[in-house]
Image (cartoon, coloured by chain):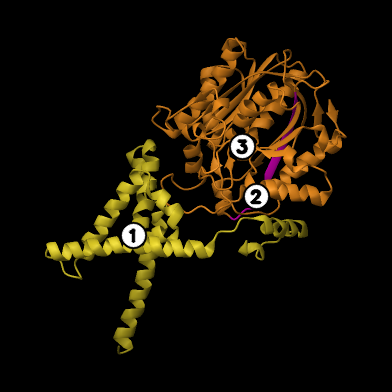
Chain colours: A orange, B yellow
């Protein structure tokens, strides 16, 4: 049901039945390795190119989610997913194996929540019983496309972020134990004229703030309703900037309840500069780490706000500014509803 | 954000950029300069050592030892790039590892390694000079301009 201009409240409460998360070697050394279903010690995943490895990440995540639910892949009615590579080939190629009807999405690093919002909407509208949704990124495949060759010796500034190698997939259904997807707010493009592709957090922070404010206003909620508000990949700089923006706009969000996936996945001391990023970042952290904690009862309501910077290497070279977007999805489990 | 003035920013964008700029972690310029000085210095010291080696053990002179020295440095740079070590030196050393000839070698070799998966002709051949190509182009052009000026000064300036 549409509430306000761009928020959907899902009265049928679609359920996240199972999830599948896959990570690479750098994630295995990180802060939350136990929350991944599969971890690879080799960045190539025994493939002969990084793009193929990227595809395998997605395939394995889908397969894990389906197996955990005790379903067959033929029972999956739709798959909604995306990644960061040109023409989202890794996801499309992975879907070839899956065989399910497929809608490819691109929302840069916000793809995970774009997919979850749309899937929940479909399930809520009785458009499907089982939907698979997810997103992935592969560090070197993405770096190759957006930046310099992997082994090129270019010094990155302290505002740069590390692209996650990982895939996170959620299997949604119309019935089950939970956690439940209760509402979603679709973001709009916010362009503050930032041009530095090595400072994504700073560019994306206003988009996250815009979506969170719209969500709270349209659902008429106080930020304290959520035990946790978690952003996708703002990193240190974006998180700090957005907190200051909330303060400036008079939104009482508490610092301890406002986290960032990009700051959860890696350990202190890993050379990630301002934090993690990539469309696999929010997908793996939310579908792995955060849902596990939610099932343990550590918190009951969370708002996930995945942020994306919608630039390409060409627009950057042509001196265009970076348009950003953020989609918010609320997930609840064990609350009084 | 030095090119802000050139672009037409709305007051809101301008205000946000100033707001963001205050909260941005800055590059430690002085620290980076000191690191670059020492890393660059170390690479040059190694180069000097190799040059001396060629002069003392082979029949090279100060003028002719340059070429084999550069070739050796590029070879070392190639090994370090291939073993995935050069980018780590570069993250620490910055300009110190980018400016010497080893940085140039790294730019060519890293691009060649990266695009190996697209085949030898379209991948390696087509992308090898992706980064270094502009250095070669503008380097040759700059040399041409300087040589022209020199020639003019010698021919007509009476130098």
- Mark 3 crowd level (few <14, some 14–19, many ≥20, 10 Å Cα): many
Residue depicted at x 41% and y 61%: B96
- Mark 2 crowd level (few <14, some 14–19, many ≥20, 10 Å Cα): many
In the drawing, does residue B159 fall left or right of residue A32? left
The reply to whether callout 2 and callout 1 are in contact (CB within 8 Å) is no
- Decide which of A251, A99 is in the foreground and name it: A251
Foreground mark, 1 or 3?
3
Q: Quadrant of the N terminus of chain A?
A: top right
Foreground mark, 2 or 1?
2
Check if mark 3 and mark 2 are on a common chain.
yes
Foreground mark, 3 or 2?
3
- What percent of the width, then of the height, locates residue A97? 51, 18
User: For residue B101, which numbered disc appears in the image?
Assistant: 1
Residue behind mark 3: A264
Q: Is A125 located above or below residue B56 in the figure?
A: above
User: For residue A237, which numbered disc appears in the image?
Assistant: 2
Check if mark 1 and mark 3 are on a common chain.
no
Q: Residue B112 appears in which quarter of the rendering? A: top left
In the drawing, does residue A88 fall left or right of residue B136? right
Q: CA distance from mark 3 to mark 2?
A: 14 Å
Q: CA distance from mark 1 to mark 3?
A: 39 Å
Residue A98, visible in the rendered structure = yes
């Amino acid at each position: 049901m549409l509430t306000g201009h761009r928020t959907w409240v899902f009265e049928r409460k679609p359920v996240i039945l199972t999830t599948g998360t896959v990570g690479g070697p750098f994630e295995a050394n990180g802060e939350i390795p136990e929350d991944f279903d599969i971890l690879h010690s080799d960045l190539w995943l025994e493939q002969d190119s990084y793009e193929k490895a990227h595809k395998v990440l997605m395939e394995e995540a889908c397969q894990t989610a389906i197996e955990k639910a005790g379903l067959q892949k033929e029972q999956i009615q739709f798959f909604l997913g995306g990644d960061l590579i040109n023409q989202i080939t890794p996801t499309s190629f992975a879907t070839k194996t899956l065989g399910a009807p497929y809608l490819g999405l691109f929302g840069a690093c916000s793809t995970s929540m774009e997919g979850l919002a749309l899937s929940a909407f479909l399930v809520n509208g009785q458009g499907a019983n089982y939907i698979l949704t997810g997103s992935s990124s592969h560090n070197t495949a993405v770096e190759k496309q957006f930046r310099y060759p992997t082994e090129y010796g270019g010094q990155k500034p302290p505002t740069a972020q590390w692209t996650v190698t990982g895939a996170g997939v959620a299997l949604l259904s119309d019935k089950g134990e939970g956690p439940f997807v209760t509402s979603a707010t679709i973001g709009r493009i916010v362009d503050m004229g930032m041009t530095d592709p090595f400072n994504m957090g700073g560019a994306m922070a206003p988009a996250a703030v815009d979506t969170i404010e719209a969500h709270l206003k349209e659902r008429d909620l106080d930020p304290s309703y959520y035990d946790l508000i978690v952003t996708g990949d703002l990193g240190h700089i974006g998180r700090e900037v957005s907190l200051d923006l909330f303060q400036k706009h008079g939104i009482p969000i508490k610092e301890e309840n406002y986290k960032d996936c990009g700051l959860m996945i890696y350990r202190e001391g890993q050379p990630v500069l301002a934090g993690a990023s990539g469309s696999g970042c929010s997908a793996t952290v939310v579908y792995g780490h955060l849902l596990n904690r939610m099932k343990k009862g550590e918190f009951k309501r969370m708002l996930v706000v995945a942020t994306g910077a919608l630039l390409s290497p060409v627009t950057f070279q042509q001196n265009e500014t970076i348009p950003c977007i953020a989609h918010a999805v609320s997930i609840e489990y064990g609350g009084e509803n | 954000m030095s090119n802000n003035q050139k672009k037409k920013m709305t007051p809101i964008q301008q205000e946000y950029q100033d707001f963001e700029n205050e909260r941005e972690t800055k590059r430690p310029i002085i620290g980076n300069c000191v690191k670059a000085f020492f890393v660059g210095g170390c690479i040059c010291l190694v180069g000097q050592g190799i040059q001396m080696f060629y002069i003392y053990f082979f029949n090279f002179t100060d003028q002719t030892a340059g070429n084999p020295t550069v070739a050796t440095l590029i070879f070392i740079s190639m090994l370090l790039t291939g073993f995935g070590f050069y980018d780590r030196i570069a993250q620490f050393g910055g300009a110190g590892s980018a400016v010497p000839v080893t940085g140039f070698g790294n730019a060519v070799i890293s691009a060649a390694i990266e695009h190996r998966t697209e085949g030898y002709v379209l991948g390696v051949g087509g992308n090898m000079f992706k980064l270094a190509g502009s250095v070669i182009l503008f380097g040759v052009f700059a040399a041409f301009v300087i040589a022209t000026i020199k020639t003019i000064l010698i021919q007509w300036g009476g130098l």
